Image (spheres, rainbow, N blue to C red):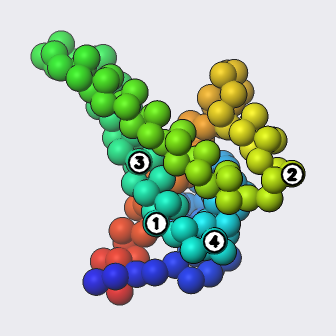
Amino acid sequence: MSYTIKDSNSFMNGLETFSGVKLKEKEMVKEMLHYSLSSDSLKLFEDVCFTAKYISGLMRVLKSAATMNDVNNTDSIKSDLAKNFEQFTVQIKGIILLMPEESQESLTQTYLEMTAESFSKLNNLILDLEWAKRYLNDLKRTQ
């Protein structure tokens, strides 16, 4: 089965309901989806959602590994996390480049600067995009 996003507003309304209104960077996700759709780059949005979900999973594994003494491959998990985090930022930059020039610098500063606030916002964005991936998976299963 296949599902294709056709309208960012209806997708976002469904996503908000699906997530239980847990989205913290809803406007950024909506803009990312809107500009991905309008520039025929939906695959980039879907890829960034996949990467976000993967990163979230790796972070959960690392957190649980910290409390378990028998997990001894955390170095490979950390390496995979770093590689995927780098890929994620490249994907985010790619989507930001689809947006109007006047907002690109501001969004880059908001999400990709090396500050605690940017990192916090980026983590929230990762969690929101993980919800988007889960929602996409759900839509594909139920179509």
Seen in the picture, residue 45 relative to 79 is either above or below; the reply is: below
Res 104 seen here: yes
Q: Amino acid at mark 3?
A: Thr
Q: Identify the residue position indicated by label 3 in the image.
A: 51
Residue at the limit of the structure toward the bottom, as seen here: 143
Q: Amino acid at mark 4?
A: Ser
Q: Nearer the viewer, residue 12 or 4?
A: 4
Q: Quadrant of residue 115?
A: top right
- CA–CA distance in space, label 1 to label 4: 11 Å
Seen in the picture, residue 61 relative to 36 is either above or below; the reply is: above
Q: Residue at x 45, y 47 (%)?
A: 52
Q: Identify the residue position indicated by label 2 in the image.
A: 102
Residue at the limit of the structure toward the right, as seen here: 102
Q: Secondary structure at mark 2?
A: helix
Q: Position of residue 2 (x, y in %)?
A: 34, 82
Q: Identify the residue position indicated by label 4 in the image.
A: 39
Q: Identify the residue position indicated by label 1 in the image.
A: 43
Residue at the limit of the structure toward the top, as seen here: 69
**Badge nearest the viewer, 1 or 3:** 1
Tell me which numbered mark, 1 or 3, is placed earlier along the sequence. Answer: 1
Q: Nearer the viewer, residue 72 or 35?
A: 35
